[in-house]
Amino acid sequence: MSRDEDLVRAALRAAGRAPETGDVPIGAVVFDPDGHELAGACNAREATGDPTAHAEVLAIRAAAARFGDGWRLEGCTLAVTVEPCTMCAGALVLARVSRVVFGAWEPRTGAVGSLWDVVRDRRLNHRPEVVGGVLADECAAVVEEFFDGHRFR
């Protein structure tokens, strides 16, 4: 098993907490430069009533509180089960995350290569390394199963 698969599996475990809150099961985990987990989170928009409570933003906030100077996550890796949206892509760029590893591609809202490519925009002052499609089928299945249970028939 590759190291990136291990990272995404940790994000899948974090995603497993989301159904308890009624949120879409997306999970994110931030790892320090040595590969130790700093923080993990699942989506919590429904639970908190906060539209910015995406897994990535919550994990970045918690990791920044534990690492470095309080907001820079240089040398850190963010692993997430689904390609980040525009807001989350912007947040990880601003937090100086060095590497992003994600599972399922999101062609409708993805901002790390699908619909947009915020993280590789040359006009920005930071561009993380991106690895996408890690355990993509497994990550997509978790979200599809959630929505299958919430669709009207």
Image (cartoon, rainbow, N blue to C red):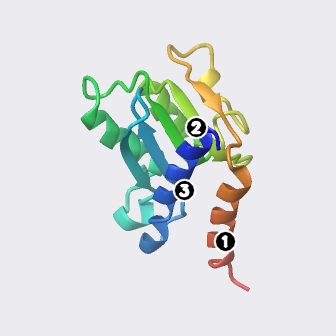
With 3 as the anchor, is 46 left or right in this view? Answer: left
Give whichever of discs 1 and 3 has the lower sequence position: 3
Mark 2 crowd level (few <14, some 14–19, many ≥20, 10 Å Cα): few
Tags 2 and 3 touching, CB below 8 Å: no
Question: Which quadrant would residue 36 be assigned to in this image?
Answer: top left
Identify the image quadrant of the C terminus. bottom right
Please state the horizontal and vertical placement of residue 106, each as a whole percent of the image.
Answer: 69, 48
The first of marks 2 and 3 along the sequence is: 2
Name of the residue lying farthest toward the front: 1
User: Disc 1 on helix, strand or loop?
Assistant: helix
What x and y, as percent, mark residue 145?
Answer: 66, 71
Query: Which amino acid type is shown beneath numbered disc 3?
Result: Leu
Q: Give me the residue at 72% from left, 38% from top.
A: 115
Rendering quarter of residue 142: bottom right
Neighbour class for label 3 at 10 Å: few (<14), some, many (≥20)?
A: many
x and y, in percent, of residue 126 in the image: 51, 17
Judging depth in this view, the residue of 134 and 107 nearest the camera is 134
Q: Which mark is residue 12?
A: 3
In the foreground, 47 or 99: 99
Real-space Cα separation, disc 1 to disc 3, in angstroms: 14 Å
Q: Earlier in the sequence, mark 1 or mark 2?
A: 2
Report crowding for label 1: few under 14, some 14 to 19, many 20 or more residues within 10 A (C-alpha).
few
Amino acid bearing label 2: Arg
Q: Quadrant of the N terminus?
A: top right
Percent x, y of residue 113: 70, 33
Is 118 situated left or right of 21 in this image? Answer: right
Q: Which residue is mark 2?
A: 3
Residue under the image location 54 percent in, 28 percent down = 99
- Residue corresponding to mark 1: 145
